[in-house]
Image (spheres, rainbow, N blue to C red):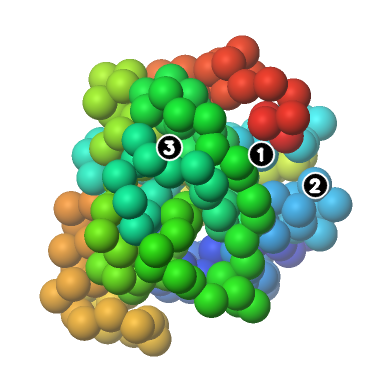
Amino acid sequence: MQDMVRIAAINYLNTIPFIYGLEAKMAPGTIVMQFCTPAESARMLREDRADVGIMPVGALCDLRDPHIVSDFCIGATGKVASVVLCSGRPIAEVGEIRLDVDSRTSVLLTQLLCREKWHIAPRFVPFDFACQRLDPSKSYLLIGDKALLHAVEFAYVYDLAEEWIALKKLPFVFAAWTANKPLEPRFIESFNQALEYGIRHIPEAVEKYNHQFPREYALKYLRDNISFTLDSEKRAGLSEFRRVALEKLTPRECVC
């Protein structure tokens, strides 16, 4: 019998349907959830402090033996709203971008878009929202709830999923449920059934968990901006992103 599975669960609005499903449907004693940022999820899997997590796809190469174990993900087929480049000036005039340290995927996507779509070469510097203040005259990559809350403070906002889709004509996958070791097929089946249950009960998830958003705003975001199914089109988008990240970015830019 498999031991209790340790799950790295990201504590953003876009993951609450997954959390709802796992808490409602996984048998007691089968999982333990640890809440974290996307970057922390990747680190926990790399250090074997978790068995499965919502892994930023830009960090998949951190794992010696990654296993995408679910047909569900955090993806977008249009505007995602929660991964944005916010700026006080038009993108063509941006000379420096402060990069949110919470997700490597979004950092790589920003760097790719600068090079391949916007044709600019800004200086990239790390930005930790927890201990640094936003300046609406500057330029930032923001992800997750902080993007939803603070994008309105800036004169120019570029949605990174929307920009990727315009460039590649493919959807984008920000994070996928990934294990760092083989898991029992019976567990994977139950795990996916729980995730699907959560996605089918988004209103209940929004009601159950504390978050910083009005109910209707949260429902609209989860239904219209996040695409949870890891279908063949998203898998193609994921493969294309990983290919161009490795081929187009220099070693200094691409840290995976």
How crowded is the residue under tag 3: few (<14 C-alpha within 10 Å), some, or many (20+)? many
Is the C-beta separation of discs 1 and 3 under 8 Å? Answer: no
Q: In this view, does 105 lie to the left or right of 205?
A: right
Q: Residue at x 23, y 45 (%)?
A: 79
Amino acid at circle 3: Val
Amino acid at circle 2: Arg
Residue 46: which numbered mark, if any? Answer: 2
Reply above or below: 160 against 151: above
Q: Which residue is drawn at 56% across and 54% down?
A: 98
Residue 189: which numbered mark, if any? Answer: none
Amino acid at circle 1: Ala
The kind of secondary structure element at disc 1 is helix
Q: Which of marks 1 and 3 is nearer the N terminus?
A: 1
In the picture of the structure, the residue carrying the numbered disc 3 is 173
In x, y percent, where is residue 32?
Answer: 67, 70
Q: Which residue is farthest top?
A: 247
Q: Nearer the viewer, mark 1 or mark 2?
A: 1
In the picture of the structure, the residue carrying the numbered disc 1 is 59
Q: Residue at x 60, y 74 (%)?
A: 132
How far separated are the C-alphas under marks 1 and 2? 9 Å
Is the C-beta separation of discs 1 and 2 under 8 Å? Answer: yes
The kind of secondary structure element at disc 2 is helix
Residue 5 appears in the figure = no
Q: Nearer the viewer, residue 56 or 15?
A: 56
In x, y percent, where is residue 256?
Answer: 72, 32
How far separated are the C-alphas under marks 1 and 3? 12 Å
The kind of secondary structure element at disc 3 is strand
In x, y percent, where is residue 215?
Answer: 19, 80
Q: Which of marks 1 and 2 is nearer the N terminus?
A: 2
Residue 37 appears in the figure = yes
